[in-house]
Image (spheres, grey):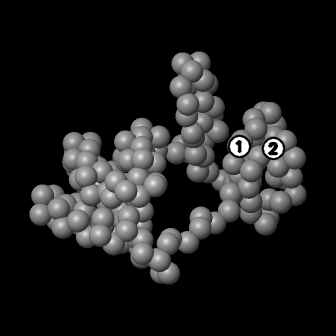
């Protein structure tokens, strides 16, 4: 996640040159970003459609941009579990990520995707989210994860968003 279109384009250019897949999120003034994208001929894959920008974004949508929609609600027996750390995050975040991976139910069909997310999210999300990560877990998985993290890494902050909240 970056704050300017120039920075996003630099990352995209470097990764494409090295033939590596990349996703870049741009968090900046939406009106300025849309205007810059159109002026510079940059075509985003995803857009957040804001009512005030509908007029300007129609060109990007016509060219193939997909409009982001609200994420689907969590399944009734799952929670979105987020963890974050202060200080020297890299080592602790890797260790807590491993605890999360160990806590996952291998019989669930989405477990390979969730394991991949644990592994790739730190690189994909960059420095902005280096000290925080979230993952959807069922109640058994989250109970196992929370118990172990609280005993091994008590300084890690945990938050839990249950389905329907």
Using the rendered view, name the quadrant where residue 137 is placed.
bottom left
Question: Residue, x 55% and y 31% (percent of image)?
Answer: 21
**Residue receiving disc 2:** 64
**Residue receiving disc 1:** 45
Front one among 59 and 110: 110
Front one among 62 and 89: 62
Apparent side of residue 90 relative to residue 122 in the rendered image (left or right) = left
Q: Position of residue 121 (x, y in %)?
A: 42, 45
Question: Residue, x 50% and y 81% (percent of image)?
Answer: 164
Apparent side of residue 79 relative to residue 21 in the rendered image (left or right) = left
Contact between marks 2 and 1 (CB within 8 A): the answer is yes
The CA distance from mark 2 to mark 1 is 7 Å
Mark 2 burial class by Cα count in 10 Å: few <14, some 14-19, many 20+: few
Q: Position of residue 136 (x, y in %)?
A: 42, 62
Mark 1 burial class by Cα count in 10 Å: few <14, some 14-19, many 20+: some
Q: Is residue 96 visible?
A: no
Residue positioned most to the bottom: 164
What number is the disc on residue 18?
none
Is 72 placed above or below 106 here?
Answer: below
- What is the tally of numbered marks visible in this picture? 2
Q: Position of residue 106 (x, y in %)?
A: 34, 54
């Amino acid at each position: 996640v970056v704050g300017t279109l120039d920075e996003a384009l630099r990352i995209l250019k470097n990764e494409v040159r090295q033939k590596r897949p990349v996703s870049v999120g741009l968090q900046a003034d939406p009106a300025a970003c849309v205007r810059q994208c159109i002026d510079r001929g940059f075509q985003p894959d995803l857009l957040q459609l804001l009512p005030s920008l509908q007029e300007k974004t129609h060109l990007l949508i016509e060219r193939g941009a997909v409009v982001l929609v609200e994420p689907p609600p969590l399944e009734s027996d799952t929670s979105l579990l987020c963890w974050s750390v202060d200080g020297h995050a890299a080592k602790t975040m890797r260790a807590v990520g491993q605890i999360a991976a160990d806590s996952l139910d291998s019989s669930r069909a989405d477990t390979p995707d969730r394991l991949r997310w644990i592994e790739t999210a730190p690189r994909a999300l960059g420095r902005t989210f280096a000290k925080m990560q979230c993952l959807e877990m069922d109640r058994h998985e989250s109970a196992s994860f929370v118990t172990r993290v609280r005993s091994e890494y008590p300084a890690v902050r945990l938050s839990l968003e249950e389905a329907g909240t």
